[in-house]
Amino acid sequence: MMEDEELEFVEDLEAILNLTPEVQLAIEQVFPSQDPLDRADFNAVEYINTLFPTEQSLANIDEVVNNIRLKIRRLDDNIRTVVRGQTNVGQDGRQALEEAQKAIQQLFGKIKDIKDKAEKSEQMVKEITRDIKQLDHAKRHLTTSITTLNHLHMLAGGVDSLEAMTRKRQYGEVANLLQGVVNVIEHFQKYMGIPQIRQLSERVKEAQSELGTQILSDFEESFPAQGSKKSGGPSIVLRDACLVANVLDPRIKQEIIKKFIRQHLSEYLVLFQENQDVAWLDKIDRRYAWIKRQLVDYEEKYGRMFPEEWCMTERIAVEFCHITRTELAKLMRTRAREIEVKLLLFAIQRTTNFEGLLAKRFSGCTLNDGPGQKKTETPLEPTNPFLEDESGEENASEKDEDLDRPKKPKAPDNPFHGIVSKCFEPHLYVYIESQDKNLGELIDRFVSDFRTQGPPKSGTDEGGAVLPSCADLFVYYKKCMVQCSQLSTGEPMIALTTIFQKYLREYAWKILSGNLPKTSTNSGGLTISSLLKEKEGSEVAKFTTEELCLICSILSTAEYCLATTQQLEEKLKEKVDKSLMERINLTGEMDTFSTVISNSIQLLVQDLDAACDPALTAMSKMPWQSVEHVGDQSPYVTSVIMHIKQNVPIIRDNLASTRKYFTQFCIKFTNSFIPKFINHLFRCKPISMVGAEQLLLDTHSLKTVLLDLPSIGSQVVRKAPASYTKIVVKGMTRAEMILKVVMAPHEPSVVFVDNYIKLLADSNPETFQKILDMKGLKRSEQSSMLELFRQRLPTPPSGPDSGSSLSFSTPTPEQESSRIRKLEKLIKKRIQ
């Protein structure tokens, strides 16, 4: 029974000591221990086995038991101490809580006392400041009342004085008083509900109305509409009346200005009536001379009568401009047939000079002020594209019509530009037609001079230079553009641009393309087929040195025209109104000059190409099968080099100013010569091993010459452009690979075919057929070779790119260069 009770006690104890993993983890973190007895998964059997691992260790069992009992006794003491220590904890906690509650109650009582005292203080402050606020309000109201009463007194007295002074025409005193009354009445706007205030306001308005009527009447009497001026001249009364008008309704001031200017310019309308001789354009100077005298006369007589801020002098001048523009427009519509270019330009020049004079004298502040006056259109700010070199381009041979053009472009800040000269714009078609005629005559003169003087002579500074006629044409264009931009920036500029386009094309056709040398006297021109029929050693029609210089001059001129036309288009867009900029487009003319450049380069290439054709023909007719030894370069190579050395230095020297087009010439010649050389190479059949070696040597010589082509015959050696070098290396390396394949033995066939595919990377059976012909193989051998070639071709990859490329790759430039060096060494060994 005792054993059963002990087992139950152990099970209950284990149930009590079975802690959750979270609690166990927390205990381990707070009280870390390495003692196995403290582990949650403690196993008594394992622990005993640890203490007594062997039978011999059982001899110490008494000692171990004593140690365990000692440890148990220490644990019991510790537990007993802790339990006793916790006996008074509850009582101490309750006591501390009671003390905290008492402290909180005391703090709450103190806070309540402070709040009560603050409320009492606030109430006390309100009682103190209540009286102060009342005093402030009373003071403000009293001040306002006193100020209002003072204003009312001033207003009442001012109105009485104003009415009395108005009847006596004491305008000097009225001007000062009226302004003060108007300012005071503004303070009573919120009191208009009071009858007395409203009555005073109405009296002020009546006084203002009476003053306006009275002042207008005084001016009418002093300056009657008939145009006769009062003998006494301007009076002090009228001067003071103007000061009053400044305070009155602005319409009174405008009416005074309008009547005075109308009276002042009435004489002008009589003197320059439409039926008068002085009204026509040839005497337009008299109009401007008259207004200058009138302005001087006004300054002397009436300058002090009107306030300076009225700008009466400028207003008179502006009204004169409006009247003049209207009268001239009407007169030119009536006598349009009598308008000539010189007369029109003369009138425009004098008018623009007068507008410039107005800009120097006046600010233009009245242009958008006053009834019936409209703000003049301010043109785009001009940036004369050729002003900086215009003085240097003047020459004594200018035509008479150029002498009467306006001397200076309009100032960019001239507010008066176009205020009169705008009336000439509808008649500028006369000027445009004149420029059309003049440019036509200029082109005809250029054609005639070219035929008379002939092309530039070789060996002179003229050779390869821009044709003088080109500079003359664009100088004339610049003058026309500057002149027209002074006249108008609207539709006339578009019409002038159309004229420019017309004669740019004519210059390109008649002067440039029309004077390019012909390649042959017959209509068919110089063709490759005709050249191939030439016998070895026969002379081929070539351009003379003068003709080469002429082609280079035309090319340089076309390049200059191309660049200048682009600049001309940009400057025209700057001159014209923004709304018309899109209508200016000289792309077609620039394309025309580009075509001339391409044709010129093609002529130079064709001439040198044709000169080399007889040598290539001679190469294809040589008996390469019977060549016994490899010597120096063949005669045909010497002939090709000779022609290159004859032509290229001339072309290079004459295209020194247009280096990029000389590079284009070199590239185009190389692209033409190398394929032709390879085609002639295929015609060299049959070829022996020694003959192939000689051809390989010749090919290398030609390659060296072509690489040096840009600087051949020049004292200054320049590195050829990379793009050009790449073309030469690629093309001539193919020729060398062809000869290397020809030199290779055709037995065994598989090795020969694989070698061909590796070196040439050409899947065309026709090329392979030509190689076999060069080797001199029989047809039966060629058939088997061709069949083997088709079998050995790499299978093209499937997919969208299957037909675009072969599976094998073209040798890289490094591989080609390495092969060529090996081939050169082989040739040198054989020569030795």
Image (cartoon, rainbow, N blue to C red):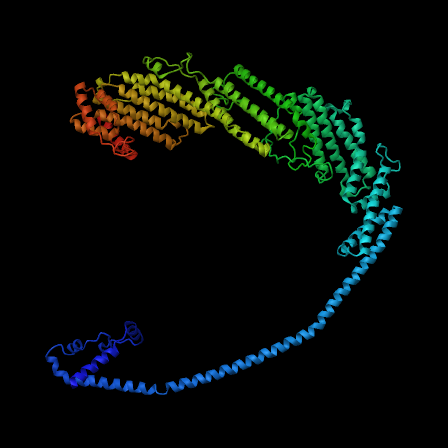
Quarter-of-image position of residue 708: top left
Q: Quadrant of the N terminus?
A: bottom left
At which x and y percent is residue 104?
49, 81
- Name the residue located 80 percent from the left edge and 50 percent from the top edge: 179
- Please count the marks in the image: 0
Quarter placement of the C terminus: top left
Instruction: Give the x, y percent position of residue 413.
Output: 65, 37
571 to 52, vertically: above or below: above
Quarter holding residue 211? top right
Coordinates of residue 686 in the picture (x, y in percent): 22, 18
Q: In the rendered image, is residue 561 in sight?
A: yes
At x 30% / y 16%, what residue is drawn? Answer: 618
Give the left or right position of residue 507, taking residue 752 as reference.
right
Front one among 196 and 483: 196
In the displayed structure, does residue 684 sit left or right of residue 297?
left
Q: Nearer the viewer, residue 346 or 223?
A: 223
Across and down, in percent, residue 550 comes to: 47, 20
Q: Nearer the viewer, residue 548 or 789?
A: 789
Instruction: Determine the residue positioned at 36% across, 23% down.
Output: 672
In which quarter of the view is residue 584 placed?
top right
Determine whether 68 is above or below 343 in the image. below
Residue 832 in view here: no
